[in-house]
Amino acid sequence: MSGAILYIKKDLHITEVQQEIFVGCLSIVSLIGGLTGGPTSDLIGRKWTIGIGAVIFQAGAVVMTFAPSFRILLLGRLITGVGIGFSASISAIYVAEISPAITRGTLVSLPEICINIGILLGYISNFAFSGLPQHYNWRIMLGIGILPAVFNGITFYIIPESPRWLVMQNRLEEARSVLVKVSDRGEDVEQRLKEIKEAACVNTDYKRKALYQEILCPSPGVRRMLAAGCGIMVFQQITGIDATVYYSPTIFKNAGIKSEKKILATTVAVGFTKTIFTVVAMFCIDKVGRKVLLYVSTIGMTACLAVLGIALALQKHLSGSVIQDFGIGLAIFAVCANVAFYAVGMGPICWVVSSEVFPLRLRAKASALSQVGARVSSGLISMSFLSLSRAISVSGVFFVFSIISAIAVVFVKLCVPETKGKTLEEIETMLISEEQKLDLADTESVKTEHELETDS
């Protein structure tokens, strides 16, 4: 979209406000898919939910490709947003539920790698098709997005259903069959199946269907799980990554690059950087741990966003081609370094954490809620970036993102647990024991207050 929007503006003559609405509405409307994706996956299964999301996305991409007007184009964008929310709400959960504990972090980060490959291919298509007539180039840029969704539909017939969902449906033989296929050699399948069965019943009769009341009125332990899983997804977005991706041409234009061709070529470099460092994270996440990479990521992003703000602020006051070129180079370096630090931590690990920290009875719905938080945050940032840039300057916006990233460092320290090497059932047991301690502490506190009132 970052490259296509340059030509959509010229072809359909849309205003800046329409551009913000068009770019940001996808994230906002994806909350519809996110809110319905969790309950749907509990009802019909993780696999079918992902498949339905792919079909919805394909329909939206087709509408955008052949849209004769801005209204129809916006309609297609809204449809694709629903499809993205539907699939994104459950994809990380699905991978987490079929993965062995020792490689779960690596495997759950694969969706983020695929997202980055998609972004990179989008940047490359923008560059490749930019020379075509503007009435057709942006349509092709958006239209080729149909192909990955078709591939997703094909793999739907190959992938197994989540063994944990099968256990929840009391389809134990099917769950055992899937576990045999996806387990490490030498792993005790019967022991894993037993642990999953126990987790499906722990602290609750599963006939309650994990209603949203438990999320809306959480106990102290569940509140901590929600803070970690939902909070990290919100911080992933409000540190400005989607604004950087969507509006990278605008950022580089403010940095002093004039040629559209050069701007699009620079965005390809950003895409390569983001993809490469996501792969680095994939190989490190199960060895180094979640929190260490999150610390590296948030601290690095804080510094890079501040440097980018400085580079853009100075660019307005620089004179002389050599100094201006240095400012442009510094801005490009800061953007690439920022997406690198994001990709090595906040990008993939937020997906991992939000798929791990919730108990089985709440996992689909709570993870969907965390996706909704991320999508709403992304939409608000995307839809307000141009207006904020006009109000406080582009450099000012990135100084704000830098401050938010610094707050994220503190959040990681206080709220995010380390889950490296633990099975989902072990994580659940660990957090439940903490929940019971918090409940006990609350009870003791209430008793103490009551005793003090009685004494008084």
Image: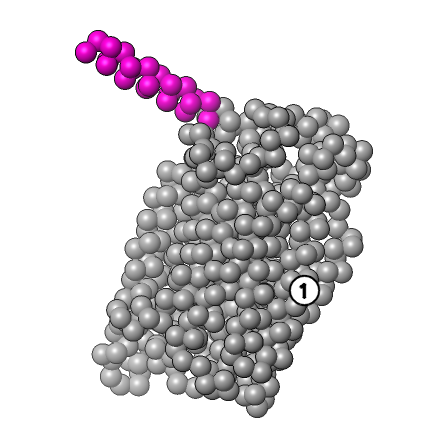
Question: In the rendered structure, which segment of residues is drawn in magenta?
Answer: 435-456
- Location of residue 9 with respect to 121 vertically, above or below: below
Residue at image x 34%, y 62%? 305
Q: Does 154 appear above or below 143? A: above
Q: Mainly helix, strand or loop, the magenta region?
A: helix
Seen as rendered, the residue at the extreme top is 455
Query: Which element type, helix, strand or loop, lies under badge 1?
Result: helix
**Residue 455 on the magenta span:** yes
Question: Which residue occupies 26% across, 70% down?
Answer: 391
Which residue type does callout 1 highlight? Ala
Name the residue beneath numbered marker 1: 149
Residue 389 image-quadrant placement: bottom left
Pick the residue in front: 314 or 29: 29
- Where is residue 69 shown, x and y percent of the image? 54, 81
In the rendered view, would you say 142 is above or below 192?
Answer: below
Query: Can you see residue 188?
Result: no
In the shown orientation, is residue 428 left or right of residue 55?
A: left
